[in-house]
Amino acid sequence: MLASRSMTDRIVDWLITIFLLAVGISTLLPLVNTLAISLSDKAAVSGGMVGLWPVGFNLNSYSFILRDEKFWQAFGVSVQRVLLGGALNFVLAVLTAFPLSRTTRAFPARDVFMWLFVFGMILNVGIVPWYLTISGYGLIDNIWALVLPGAVPIWNVIILMNFFRNIPKELDEAARIDGANPWQLLWSVYLPTSLPALATITLFSIVGHWNSFFDGLILMNNPNNYPLQTYIQQLVIADRPALHGGQAQLLAQLSNNTLNAAKLFVAMIPILIVYPFLQRYFIRGIMLGAVKE
Amino acid sequence: MFKDTDRLAYYAMILPGLVLLFAFTFVPLFYSVIAFQRFNPALGIQGSPWVGLDNILYMFSLRDARQVFFNTVFIATMKMIFVLLTAVAFALLLNEVRFLRVRRSIQTMVYLPHFLSWVILAGILRTILARDGMVNDFLALFGIGPIYFLGQPNIFPWVIIFSDVWKEFGFEAIVYLAALTAIDPTLYEVAELDGANRFQKMRFISIPGIAPVIVLVGCLSIGNVLNAGFDQIFNLYSPIVYSTGDIIDTYVYRIGLIQGQYSLGTAVGLFKTVVALLLIGVSYWAAGKYANYRIF
């Protein structure tokens, strides 16, 4: 800074900082309220007395969830789809992005394929034909229905392709002179140099799989096959309490509100755990996605 | 240099992706022909009778459909405007915060809702917006309410719009913050020498500096005018607020999959698809022309 900052300047600095801190904190207040409800006494919650701090602190709802088979079954389905879907997304993104990152001289069909994929990305055919297609393949109530339709993450392909294209050509040529074929080139030159981009797209697909509920809702008829978000959606939003395991026990100790709040919170935990990575890599991902030429 | 075996390898790599693209994006396109049939699942596409444009014409005659179309465009447009304005204001203010630690903490707080699903956030919103929820408790301190946020048609769209602002403003601010960091610091120093105050610097340096990004975001959002946010509305609405809260996607879901009017659902969906394709074309064209942007 050139001139020393005046008193008013510094006061305004503080005011702005305090205002933004207040904005930041109030963004989180709804989440704090949910946590407080999940830790509160049933009576206090139904009396509307719980704000940001638990009233009648107890862990009943959490110990109930620990024993709730239906909840963990749904949790298991979600973990399964994240692993399966994440792996598929990763492999297909790499395999699709690499040939598309080549020049038209090296791979003449490149432009045609690129247009096909971009067209596929912006084309949204509507839910009815989409459902009929998948049920036509006999995938209803099958875990593959949750991972195959979105198996080629086209936006991730574009991010990765742009990243590949910015890798110095010299690396490419050096490997060529050593006699590397495209598979070796991808494996030993491109993959190792693209770790940040790969981390970004992997996080994108993990979060996407963990958060999606709608495919589970329409493609799974049997509630036992619901992923966690679908299960919670049916329980909390569509209000089908029959999905709670062990109803009689439940009514004795807990209200639906405390239990639902606890379930919402447990479903958030995986995201909160990966959040530090998310923050770092998603920001980078946005920048990669917005490559300008 | 460019060997045929290399090309073969490229084809082999791209093949699995192409097969899946075909199976799950282009095959549904063929299924869309049922928009021109009176589709009966028992008879299949071959057996169902063709009805020409009947479904499309019927759709235009439905008052519901017109209302739904209007709701969609209204909610989507308002979301864009308010998210954009909030994000720009937030980025400009955050840029004034000098302590890097504080800046980071604020960012960590406001980005979080972006990563949570609408199922979770809707569960939370239903709790805090309930009659005895946190928000009404707070308003009661000022003698206001209780307000039925999710049950009144005139309020519901605004709940949708501002809850979307809550989820997304911080995250959308990232691109503006990046643009602000890219501004040459000497510009500010020169302005200070000339005696410019904080607001003049903001007005004549920061805002023009991020203007191209604002134009870009604006152009790209043209393609989203028909996406008012299915996941969000689906998890927050109820029949009481259909008149203002029902959007194309929720409408198609209900008539197509719940009521089983496959052909009508497909027709409405197809209409949306066609309009959306045109809009996306326009948005990419505009983004290329006015913001020099290309996705590949």
Image (cartoon, rainbow, N blue to C red):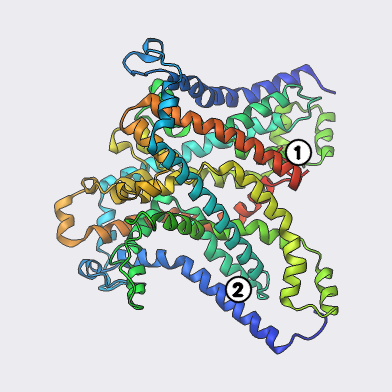
Position above or below: A110 against B243: above
Asked whether the viewer can see residue B67, the reply is yes
Circle 2 packing at 10 Å, graded few (<14), some (14-19), many (20+), is: some
- Given residues B125 and B248, the one toward you in this image is B248
Question: Please, what is the three-letter code of the amino acid marked with disc 1?
Answer: Arg
- The quadrant of the rendering that contains the C terminus of chain B is top right
Residue at screen point 73% across, 33% down: A101
How many angstroms separate mark 1 from mark 2 (CA)? 36 Å
Image quarter (top left, top right, bottom left or bottom right) of the N terminus of chain B:
top right
Relative image position of residue B79 (x, y in whole percent): 52, 53
- Asked whether the residues under the numbered discs 1 and 2 touch, taking CB atoms below 8 Å apart as contact, a structural biologist would say no
Q: Nearer the viewer, residue B54 or B201?
A: B54
Chain label for disc 2: B
Compared to residue B170, the image places residue B51 above or below, namely: above
On residue A165, the disc is 1
- Badge 1 marks a residue whose secondary structure is helix
Task: Look at 81% across and 26% down and name the residue there.
Answer: A179
